[in-house]
Image (spheres, rainbow, N blue to C red):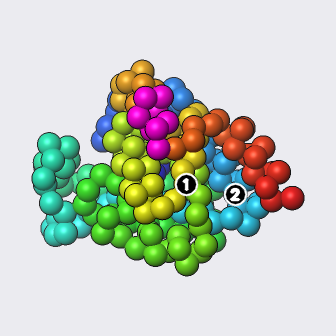
Amino acid sequence: MELQRGVMGDLATFPELAAAAEARGIVDHAARLLAAFRAAHLPVVHCMAEFRADREGTVANTPLHTAVLRRPEHLLEGTAATDLVPGLGAQPSDYVSVRRHGVAPFTGTSLDDTLHELGVRVLAVTGVSTNLGVLGLCVEAVNLGYQVVVASDAVAGVPLDYADEVLRNSISLVAAVHTVDEITRALAVLTR
């Protein structure tokens, strides 16, 4: 979820989120999880946010969107800000789902259709931000009938201690919460 240069990477317009992601080491943890999924021949999907230069298709219906849409360069489609952060090792076999509105990846995108076509029923989630986008992803996924597992050491939010509380007290009600090591060990057993 939004492991993008302009969200939490070197071009981040949210420096506090970038710092939290760095402190948690989510790029390294997410990269290990992605490598395990690819090795098991399971799909990897990057859920990205980007905006058109004219902002068509994006509604400024939240304080967050109102603020970021005032920045004409923020996550502009086709720019380096919308790229995955280095270190994730994007592969041609990966899928990308892009949204231009809202805070979660399912509504108004083809993500659900893509996952159904791939036969996916369980999602392993990494990314930012725990207290908004990741939470929204989990709730939308559960509402669509998916099981969700969140990699606790591969998610971050701001402030980090609050994001951890969201993980413990909200996300844990709709998703299993495990470390990347725990998920990869389970994956190894399941794919033998």
- Disc 1 crowd, CA 10 A, few/some/many (<14, 14-19, 20+): some
What residue is shown at x 44% (from left), y 57% (from top)?
141
Most foreground residue, 174 or 156: 174
The disc placed on residue 117 is none
Q: Which segment did they paint magenta? A: 167-174
Q: Which residue lies furthest to the bottom in this view?
A: 117
Give the SS element for disc 2.
helix
The disc placed on residue 37 is 2
Between marks 2 and 1 in the image, the one whose residue lies nearer the viewer: 1
Which percent across, then down, holds residue 65?
Answer: 18, 49
The disc placed on residue 147 is 1
What residue is shown at x 61% (from left), y 73% (from top)?
119
Q: What's the distance in space between the residues labelled 2 and 1, CA to CA?
A: 16 Å
**Which secondary structure is most common in the magenta stretch?**
helix
Give the SS element for disc 1.
strand
Most foreground residue, 71 or 94: 94
Note whether 31 is above or below 192 in the view shown. Answer: above
Note whether 18 is above or below 118 in the view shown. Answer: above
What residue is shown at x 36% (from left), y 29% (from top)?
158
Q: Does the magenta stretch include residue 40?
A: no
In the image: residue 23, left or right of residue 92: left
- Disc 2 crowd, CA 10 A, few/some/many (<14, 14-19, 20+): some
Task: Specify the amino acid type for callout 2.
Answer: Phe
Is residue 20 among the parts visible in the rendering? no
Marks 2 and 1 in Cβ contact (< 8 Å): no
**Quadrant position of the C terminus in the picture:** bottom right
Which percent across, then down, holds residue 60?
Answer: 13, 54
Task: Specify the amino acid type for callout 1.
Answer: Gln
Of the numbered discs 2 and 1, the one sitting upstream in the chain is: 2
Which percent across, then down, holds residue 35?
Answer: 71, 54
To which quarter of the image does residue 182 belong? top right
